[in-house]
Amino acid sequence: MYLTVTNATKHYGSFRALNDVSISIEKGEFVCLLGPSGCGKTSLLRIIAGLADLDEGDVQLNGKSLLKISARKRDFGIVFQSYSLFPNMTVAENIGYGLKIRKIPADQISARVSELLDIIKLPQFADKIPGQLSGGQQQRVALARAIAVNPRVLLLDEPLSALDAQVRGELRDEIHQLQRSLGIPTLMVTHDQEEALALADKIICMNQGVVVQSGTPHELYHKPATRFVATFMGTSNLISTQKIKSIMPELLSTRPGGDDDQYDACIRPESIRIEANPKGEASIVSIGFLGNLSKIKLASPLGNLIVEVHGATDLKEKQKVSLDIAPADCIWVENDVAGIAE
């Protein structure tokens, strides 16, 4: 493993921000720390960056501990949500700042800055100051400044959350392409599951200071281990074993052994098939057209359900429909409802 955190524990007074957390990042890997506010993801990133100390545990790069190495000497690139650009420096000066303090020759700095301005698609903004740029442009400059020094690891702390939806989507794609082309190991903190699904090779889902589950985006979406992960990773219909047993017992064929209250069925909205039927067991409460899909809310014996169908639908509100759910579409998750953050 390239970068590892082992048994990390961190307290702020009586509050335990991290509780025996261990993670790893391979060379060239893009990893997202995903979770709700207060789950410990930013505390973990700051510890890796050297901006906060551990109470217990270790952080290692290539097998060597970083605990006694200052943040500056770790050679990590960091991009914050707030951009943190120097307001009185030009774009070019901001990008070249890290190279300048490393006493890189001026001609090499100029060449590197020019190269990065082309990469971030802002070559005409070299002489502007940050206040003359949009939020998206400022974040591009912050990203260029972070990678200018060829960092050993790139750390991104909610870098897109302050941007509007369209700019966020565009910059997300650019970050993905840039990371792939440069191969810099990258750790990004986010609370946005769509960002994590789109960007990450590996997602580490956190809650209340612990790692709840880690794996590929496909694994966390299609095989969530707990009710919390199922809820946080996209939209889920969560149904108790007792209700399944009384309404659709045929779905129990895929359920693991254990007490009935140990597992809930997670059924993704796209896995439920519905059909107009005057004698159907469910009725349509509302239909929301979202362009590429329609989100349909149902009242059914299994409870309130959300169904997604591609494009528009001819179904109408208050219409009766029949349900078709395959046992293979039931993902059985541990019922950890007490651990779900409000």
Image (spheres, rainbow, N blue to C red):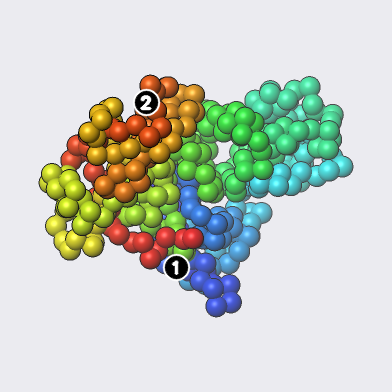
Cα separation between marks 2 and 1: 49 Å
Q: Residue furthest right?
A: 88
User: Any mark on residue 7, and which?
Assistant: none
Local SS, label 2? loop
User: Mark 2 — residue?
Assistant: 315
248 or 235: nearer the eye? Answer: 248
Q: Position of residue 29 (x, y in %)?
A: 45, 40
Q: Position of residue 199 (x, y in %)?
A: 48, 36
105 or 338: nearer the eye? Answer: 338
Q: Position of residue 107 (x, y in %)?
A: 77, 29
Q: Residue furthest bottom?
A: 14
Q: Earlier in the sequence, mark 2 or mark 1?
A: 1
338 or 304: nearer the eye? Answer: 304
Residue at image location 44% in from the left, 68% down from the top: 19
User: Mark 1 — residue?
Assistant: 19
Residue 223 placement, left or right of 147: left
Residue at image location 63% in from the left, 54% down from the top: 73
Q: Position of residue 63 (x, y in %)?
A: 43, 55
Which kind of residue does numbered mark 1 sit on?
Answer: Asn
31 or 243: nearer the eye? Answer: 243
Residue 104 appears anywhere in the view: no
Which kind of residue does numbered mark 2 sit on?
Answer: Leu
On the image, which quarter does residue 168 sit in? top right
User: For the residue carrying disc 2, how many other residues have a C-alpha within 10 Å: few (<14), some (14-19), or many (20+)?
Assistant: some
Local SS, label 1? strand
Residue at image location 84% in from the left, 29% down from the top: 127
Residue 261 appears anywhere in the view: yes
